[in-house]
Amino acid sequence: MHTRSTQRSIRRRPFQAQFSTLPKYSDEDLKLSEEKRIPDTLRHIMRNIPSSVVVLTTSATIPDISGTVQQSPEQHYRGMTLSSFTTLSLSPPLITFNIRAPSRTLSAIRQSGIFLIHLLEANKEGAAVADSFTKGNADSIEVGEAFRVRDGLFRVENIVFKAQRQRDDTLKSIWPGLPKLTGKGVKRVLACELYRSPPATDRGISNGLIEVGEHVLVVAKVLSIFLNEGLEQTEGDVQYGLSYVDGRYRTVGKTIMAHETKNDTERKMDELVRKML
């Protein structure tokens, strides 16, 4: 005959057994789980934040003192699509982006110090140009493959652009040939040089390259802006630049609210953007 207290004890046992089978996590396990969860969550969040899309081109060629290239320029072309491009300053005019290392395009930038940024149209042609350079210069593809024109999408012009670089406190001139893309999908082209802050400042950037984890942050000065002469645009028609969000190339949507410019810096920014469009 069971007493009332014995019956209570029997009923509790299955309930207590459920708690005894729960997994036990150490502090280290919880830390590792958190370290994995944050990057995955951040990746998901940023996937839905629009970013600009541009194509960077440069050359690994450094000519001799006469300014003539000894080999075919196409053999030294490097290029890649960027989604981290943005302006950093207007005075001086600085831009920035990052590249994951190692990268043959990054190595070429280190070597020559100058490159071109192609601002793309938010249309099928612009998206096609961007897609042509998404593999960059991976070892699995032939160097220069992306520069081969497909169906008249764009043409490549080798331009000789003079820039000044500081090496070992000696000012030297270099004239590398740079691959400039022209076509319906290209809005403007920015000629840029790795940025070196004035020697008088103690917070300067030594060579325009900052290593951050697996990536290298590039800071460069805009030296010239080229207009795409083949761009067809009617008066008052503004064609926005190409954007990328949720794994797709996109264009800017409807206006939610107009922003009123309140100071000179913002007015200068608006003016610069209008000139680049």
Image: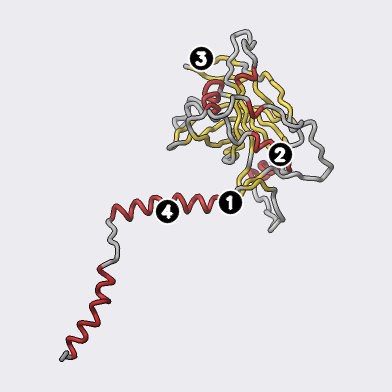
Q: Earlier in the sequence, mark 2 or mark 1?
A: 1
Q: What residue type is labelled 4?
A: Arg
| Label 1 CA crowd tier, 10 Å (few <14, some 14–19, many 20+) | few
Residue tagged 4: 37
The residue positioned 56% from the left and 36% from the top of the image is 96
Q: What element carries label 1?
A: loop
Q: Is mark 4 on a helix, strand or loop?
A: helix
Depth order, front residue of 151/207:
151
**Distance Cα–Cα, label 4 vs label 3:** 49 Å
Q: Which amino acid does label 2 sit on?
A: Gly
Q: Position of residue 132 (x, y in %)?
A: 65, 34
Q: Which of marks 4 and 3 is nearer the N terminus?
A: 4
The residue positioned 69% from the left and 36% from the top of the image is 129
Q: Earlier in the sequence, mark 2 or mark 4?
A: 4
Q: Quadrant of the N terminus?
A: bottom left
Label ID, residue 170 = 3
Q: Position of residue 168 (x, y in %)?
A: 47, 16
Q: Earlier in the sequence, mark 3 or mark 2?
A: 2
**Distance Cα–Cα, label 3 vs label 2:** 40 Å
Label ID, residue 49 = 1
Depth order, front residue of 254/251:
251
Q: Is mark 3 on a helix, strand or loop?
A: strand
Q: What residue type is labelled 1?
A: Ile
Q: Do the residues labelled 4 and 3 touch (CB within 8 Å)?
A: no
